[in-house]
Amino acid sequence: MRTYTFHVNGMHCKACVVLTESELSDVPAVSKAKSSLANHTVEVTGEFGDKEVEQVARDLSEVLKPHGYTLSLEKQQHSVNWADFNLALPIAAGFIALFIVLQKLGIVNLVTTADVSYSTAFVIGLIASVSTCMAVVGGLVLSMSANFAKEGDKVRPQVLFHIGRLVSFFVLGGAVGAVGSAFQFGAVGTFVLGVLVGVVMLILGLNLLDIFPWAKRLQPTLPRSIGKHVHRLKNINHTLTPLLIGVATFFLPCGFTQSMQLYTLSIGNVTTGAFLMLSFALGTLPVLALVSFSSFGISNKARSGVFFKTAGLVVLFFGMFNIINSLVAIGFISPLFSF
């Protein structure tokens, strides 16, 4: 047994920690893998024979490449392609301007945190579906697809997975709303949760911009042990496994999902909570369906720096609006964009 420490290139969030550990642990020669988001490294213990460390890094990189990661012996310096903002800024500004116009027309309501519409949840789902945090779900779908494809079963598992995901987000979204109604959050509680959702969105936006590496450490997630247990389900070729995996994605460490769950909790309404989480899941459906029914990984389809920076700016907009609207709801400031 030998232990090596490699630098992981392409790691963005805590979901990446779950995915890299899970994929490397599946390699027969590896007995243990432990990733670190703080250092962007992975410590691998296993029996590699008389291979040189460079060869071990290359072999393990081949396992992670489909998910957008590579291993190296030397740490790569973080760099920002500022030229991406030349396109990202006007695109994001146009999207935000359109959103505000639609809001004033009553199509999309962002006036108060209590009135965030299903359209807003759908848009956040679209952004989440192509963010690096969703790489863990995309990787899970691809791995599950490969396992069932070996037995000649390609379509049914994908359909069951997406059905399980949509149903679970609807049912569990209603459950989260029920918990919120049971606690009966007052004005202060609603304000605190609204600000908390806004802060989470700001952190997510900063991570998508990829300007400040330290922001990745701030992103809240569920314990990664939950993500590990969910990811291990992909190796069980049971008829209902895809359905269970789809249900379990509700608990995967995706910051966007958790911000929507927090918001649903603050609403305290079963029906609204159910349809909000369903709208979010429907937003993620097009990209995840494309991933599951094609040979392309989510991380390979959305590596455009311009896209991520555009999405980051839009998410920052959502975050700031959530905080501002929470202040409006308690009467601390006057509503913005009042004609």
Image (cartoon, rainbow, N blue to C red):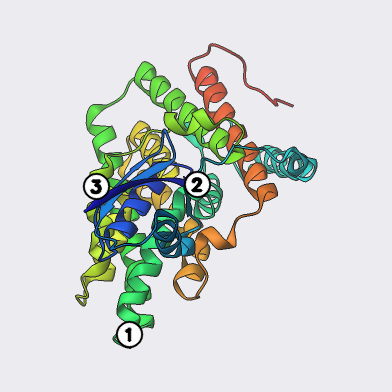
Farthest front residue in view: 50
From what the image shows, is residue 256 above or below residue 245? above
Neighbour tally class for label 3: few under 14, some 14-19, many 20 plus, Cα within 10 Å = some
Helix, strand or loop at mark 3: helix
Q: Which residue is mark 2?
A: 121
Q: Quadrant of residue 217?
A: top left
Residue 197's spot in the image, x, y percent? 44, 30
Q: Earlier in the sequence, mark 3 or mark 1?
A: 1
Q: Quadrant of residue 97?
A: top right
Q: Quadrant of residue 190?
A: top left
Q: Which residue is mark 3?
A: 226
Neighbour tally class for label 2: few under 14, some 14-19, many 20 plus, Cα within 10 Å = many
Distance in Å between CA atoms under marks 1 and 2 = 33 Å
Amino acid at circle 2: Ala
Residue 295's spot in the image, x, y percent? 50, 75
Name the residue at 58% across, 27% down: 320
Which-is-in-front pick, marks 1 and 2? 1
From what the image shows, is residue 145 above or below residue 310? below
Q: Earlier in the sequence, mark 1 or mark 2?
A: 2
Q: Which residue is mark 1?
A: 153
| CB within 8 Å, label 3 to label 1 | no
Q: Quadrant of the C terminus?
A: top right
Distance in Å between CA atoms under marks 3 and 2 = 24 Å
Name the residue at 50% across, 46% down: 121
Query: Residue 18 versus residue 221: which sits nearer the camera?
Result: 18
Residue 156's spot in the image, x, y percent? 34, 80
From what the image shows, is residue 159 above or below residue 220? below
The answer to whether residue 255 of the structure is visible from this angle is yes
